[in-house]
Image: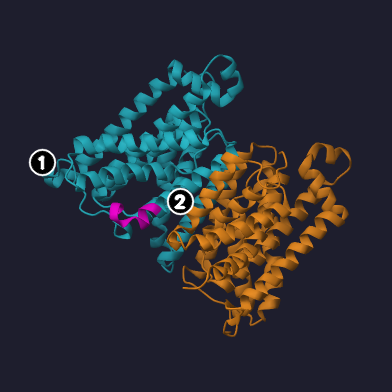
Chain colours: A cyan, B orange
Amino acid sequence: MIAYLTAIVTLVGVRALLTLGLNVQWGMTGLVNLGAVAFFAVGAYTSALLAVGGVSLVLAWPAGVALAAAAGASLALVALRLREDYLAIVTLGFAEVLRLFLLNEAWLTRGANGVTAIPRPLHAWFGGHYPAFYLLLVLAAVGLVYAALERLRRSPFGRVLRAIREDEVVAAVAGKPVFRFKVQAFALGAGVAGLAGILFAHYLAYVEPNMFLPQESLYVWLALILGGSGNNRGALLGSLVLLGLLEGSRFAKDVIPFLSGVRLAAAQQMLVGVVLVTMMIRRPDGLLPERPGSE
Amino acid sequence: MPPIAQYVFNGIVTGGILALPAVAFSLLWRLLRFPNFAVSTYLTVGAYAALVLNAGAHAPLELAWLGALAATGAVALAVDRIAFRPMRDRRPFSLAIASIGVAFVLENVVRFVWGNDFRAYDVPVSRAASVAGLRVGREQLLILGAAVVLMALSQAFLRRTRLGVAMRATADNPLLAAVKGVPTDRVIAVATFGGGALAGGAGVFVGLDASIDPLMGGGLIISVFAAAILGGIGSAPGALAGALIVGIVEEAGTLVVPPTYKTAIGFVIILAVLLVRPTGLAGSRS
């Protein structure tokens, strides 16, 4: 049971990072991104492939964050001038094309077989206590990112992002280089998603393209909307509630034994979809709405 | 290796299928002002509705196809009532997110009932004929014929009937149309039902041309978007032209890139259109 809980909370931490990343883009700045999973994958694969190739994790991890942020900046430079409904389609398509790339360019990504035997940091040191160590590592990362983003949110930079979210014309009239701020916010969020991917890859010691399906981006949205977009506490709470939904429905198997594996998975995803639509209709501000003037 | 004409012919069939959801997606986007991500999942709904009637109740596929049109239209209408109507006045992106949730629910209802297995209709196996050096399947001709009829019917509806004209008026300027006495709710209901029916009918074609599985519609989402955006949002003839181009480029593109990258071709088309000429072929201002 302890082992199970440790594993679950570790994965909540990874999801929380993803949600915090999306919160920078959508929650703080109002930038649509339906392809959060793409930057998660870039971080995971970059760091995993470098590490497997013998590069030290001290270099591989920053490289993963940097490449995820660079991918975010590139997509933003091309697409952020589009209207938000177009941007939704472009970001979704970007994530899907990236997954195809991971699947088909086996010379670089090892294709459908995935990357195996990804080194785990300090594994020899901790031995049997390793899961507990890794949990603390992930929680520390969440704590640091949370603290940094909270500072950012209250900083002049964060206020500009909020101004852009509320009315970018006003922000532009006030002399702010709106486009540059948007690209920076998008890249920052992508970098945080990349960090989540790195922690994920080195935790499982294995990644393959089908871990990065479009529905993962949907889960990140659900967590953000559940918690309340715009504030970082909401992002954390949303990740926790999402986990309750996903893991709780897994226990339904014990109560309803005749459900097959496929049916259980389908029922779980139906629940995710229903909760998302219901939240959008009834409580679009989430469980912890952003308080006006909370800085 | 088959000649390039074969790829073009296959592309026209693919384009004919894509045109139906592309027209639905394009007109609904213009009318309701949000991209409805559930439209491509309506293909899956239609394909399975016909499967129930055809393989389950042993109805001939032609009859099952008509049933699928009605059933998918009804599902689309129910979705609109339950999910989209309460959110009519919200920003487009909120509705887009909700529509992704809807697509997710529909896809998983299908998966829950029928599982992940690939299925096929109960139709006699027919050999492809050879016409002027091209391999032409009987199903392909049927699909093309039915797609042409459906496209002609929807075009006639939009141009010649009062309700169709009202629909175009509402799409152009909802406030003005409402002031002029156009029954907005009825227009939306008819468009939603019609759009669902078009997509559902296309789903049967995909099932006939390839196979039936829960991801069949969702897998076409990028191609449908590409066709609609290339055609120009809100233009039915544009969506038809866009669908034919996307179909042909995707099929012929497999000469250059591996077939697994078909989706990527659609994505490149979307990016290119949005960056170069966001209004698409039809070029109407939105």
Q: In this view, does A277 lie to the left or right of A202?
A: right
Q: How many marks?
A: 2
- When the figure is inspected, residue B158 is found, relative to residue A80, above or below; the finding is below
Residue that mark 2 sits on: A96
Identity, as a three-letter code, of the amino acid under mark 1: Trp
Is residue A242 covered in magenta? no
Give the residue at x 80% y 50%. B187
Residue that mark 1 sits on: A125
Residue B127: percent from left, percent from top: 57, 84
Give the residue at x 62% y 70%. B204
Give the residue at x 52% y 59%. B219
In 3D space, how far apart are the residues under numbered discs 1 and 2 (Cα atoms)? 39 Å
- When the figure is inspected, residue B40 is found, relative to residue A81, above or below; the finding is below
Residue nearest the viewer, comparing B186 with B6: B6
Identity, as a three-letter code, of the amino acid under mark 2: Glu
The numbered mark, 1 or 2, whose residue comes first in the sequence reads 2
Residue nearest the viewer, comparing B19 with B87: B19
Q: What stretch is highlighted in magenta?
A: A101-109
Residue B168: percent from left, percent from top: 80, 48
Residue A142: percent from left, percent from top: 32, 33
Q: Residues within 10 Å of mark 1 (few under 14, many from 20)?
A: few
